[in-house]
Every structure is written in structure tokens, then in C-alpha cells.
């Protein structure tokens, strides 16, 4: 069974631009969560989607948004990029929300210049 | 928000020795705790979990100990191997939310 895939793997953007990242969960998994990982803050929860609905949201500004499609694939969008948005963005999938075992993708490394 | 901290940011051990990685958590109501391993260029990988009503759980070469009195979690790796070199995170699960520590970088010296 294929794991969680994320595209693109690397991205360089300029301040003020926007970016869209994509995540395909493991087949059959309906819950997708997004995390931001930085050296100083570790993994910070952004949001979780289940059955195309946002179920939980972390403490991030409204510039960070996401959505989930009917095939469980998810995208996250960051608008008006700031230098501090440079991070590794990780997507994790699990069978359903509430199951503790989640599987992470390799991440998208975003660099904002 | 939750505070999940790690006692040491880096740890070096000799190949074959046992490793102990520690983690402190803040919410006594947390339901589950999970240890993850993250190798360079990869996402975190599930290692082992433990329910809050347990104090010890063993896996293959790994043992997790939970001390709820002092809100402390540890991961013990037996006979550490070069392939164990990675960053290790603990995660605290409260309700349906995951809270991660910043990680301990384990280096295995051959």
C-alpha cells in the first residue's frame, strides 16, 4: 500500500506570494492533518480534515487555510507569505479521526525569501 | 496550549549501548502518548504508543515508560544501532489533538 505523498517536495517563494501544497493520504484513510515543523517550535498542528470538513484547527492565522476533496486528498494554502513561514509542512493521514495511529508524508520544504 | 518538552536536545550513544530519551508533558488529562522517529528527509514514523492507564509498554527493542506522578515519559532503545540515529519526538494526545515536543537528536557512534 502506498504511503502518504506530498507535492511538491521543495518550494521557494517570495514574501507576499501565496502557495498551495498537496497531500494524498494512504488509500482508505479519510482523515488528513497538517503540521508545520520548524527547528525552534517543533511540530505545530495546523488543522485536520475529515470527510471534507475541517474538524480541528490549531493556533495559526487565517492566512493558513486548507480543504479536503471527496477522494480524501487535501490541499493547504498559505497566502501573503512571510519569512517566518519557512518550514517543513507535514501531512499525516489516519483511517478516521479519533484513531491514534497516524502516518506522515515526507513533507514539503517551503523557503520564503 | 499544551507544553511537551524534552530534557535534552541531543544525545550521543555508543553502538550497542542502551539509549534513554526523556519527555515531560503538562496535561494530566492526556489520553495517549506516542513516540515518533524522524530520519533526515523523512516524515515522523510511529514507534510505540502507551495509554494513560498504563505505566510500561514494550515493543521490539523499545520500551516506553510513563510516570504520571511527575508527568514524565521515556523511550528506551536497547542495543542501539546506527540505524537508530534520528530525531525522536514524543506526542501527547488530548481529546483528538496531538501535541509534539521539539525532539531529541540521537546520534549513534559506531
Image: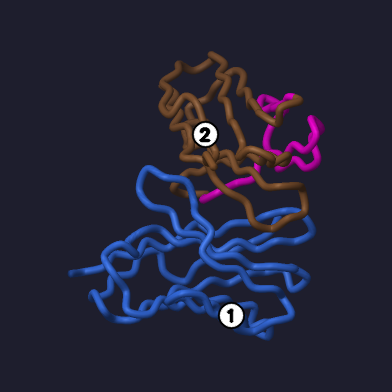
Chain colours: A brown, B blue
Residues drawn in magenta: A42-69
Q: Residue at x 53, y 71 (%)?
A: B23
Report the residue at 63% width, 27% height from top: A76
Q: Mark 2 points at which residue?
A: A5
**Is A47 left or right of B90, judged from the image as shown?**
right
* Chain that bears disc 1: B
Of the pair B65 and B99, the residue shown nearer to us: B65
| Residue for point 47% across, 71% down | B7
Q: Report the side of B107 relative to A33 (left or right).
A: left
Residue A40 in percent (x, y) is at 47, 49
Crowd class of label 2 (few under 14; some 14 to 19; many from 20; radius 10 Å): many
- Using the image, determine if residue A55 lies above or below residue B11: above
Which residue is label 1 attached to? B57
Looking at the image, the residue that sits furthest to the left is B110
Judge whether residue A49 is colored magenta. yes
Q: Where is residue B78 in the image (x, y as percent from the top left)?
A: 38, 80
Res A13 label:
none
For the residue labelled by badge 1, is the local secondary structure a helix, a strand or a loop?
strand
Amino acid at each position: 500500500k502506498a504511503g502518504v505523498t506530498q507535492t511538491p517536495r521543495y518550494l521557494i517563494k517570495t514574501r507576499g506570494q501565496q502557495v498551495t501544497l498537496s497531500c494524498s493520504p494512504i488509500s482508505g484513510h479519510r482523515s488528513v492533518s497538517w503540521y508545520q515543523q520548524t527547528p525552534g517550535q517543533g511540530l505545530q498542528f495546523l488543522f485536520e480534515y475529515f470527510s471534507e470538513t475541517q474538524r480541528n484547527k490549531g493556533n495559526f492565522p487565517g492566512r493558513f487555510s486548507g480543504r479536503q476533496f471527496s477522494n480524501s486528498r487535501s490541499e493547504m494554502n498559505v497566502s501573503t507569505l512571510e519569512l517566518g513561514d519557512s518550514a517543513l509542512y507535514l501531512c499525516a493521514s489516519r483511517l478516521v479521526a479519533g484513531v491514534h495511529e497516524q502516518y506522515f508524508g515526507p513533507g514539503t520544504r517551503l523557503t520564503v525569501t | 496550549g499544551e507544553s511537551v518538552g524534552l530534557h535534552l536536545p541531543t544525545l550521543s550513544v555508543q553502538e550497542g549501548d542502551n539509549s534513554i530519551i526523556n519527555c515531560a508533558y503538562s496535561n494530566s488529562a492526556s489520553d495517549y502518548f506516542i513516540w515518533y522517529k524522524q530520519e533526515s528527509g523523512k516524515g515522523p514514523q510511529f514507534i510505540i504508543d502507551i495509554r494513560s492507564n498504563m505505566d510500561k509498554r514494550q515493543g521490539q527493542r523499545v520500551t516506553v515508560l510513563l510516570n504520571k506522578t511527575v508527568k514524565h515519559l521515556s523511550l528506551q532503545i536497547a542495543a542501539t544501532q546506527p540505524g537508530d540515529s534520528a530525531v525522536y519526538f514524543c506526542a501527547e494526545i488530548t481529546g483528538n489533538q496531538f501535541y509534539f515536543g521539539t525532539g531529541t537528536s540521537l546520534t549513534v557512534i559506531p
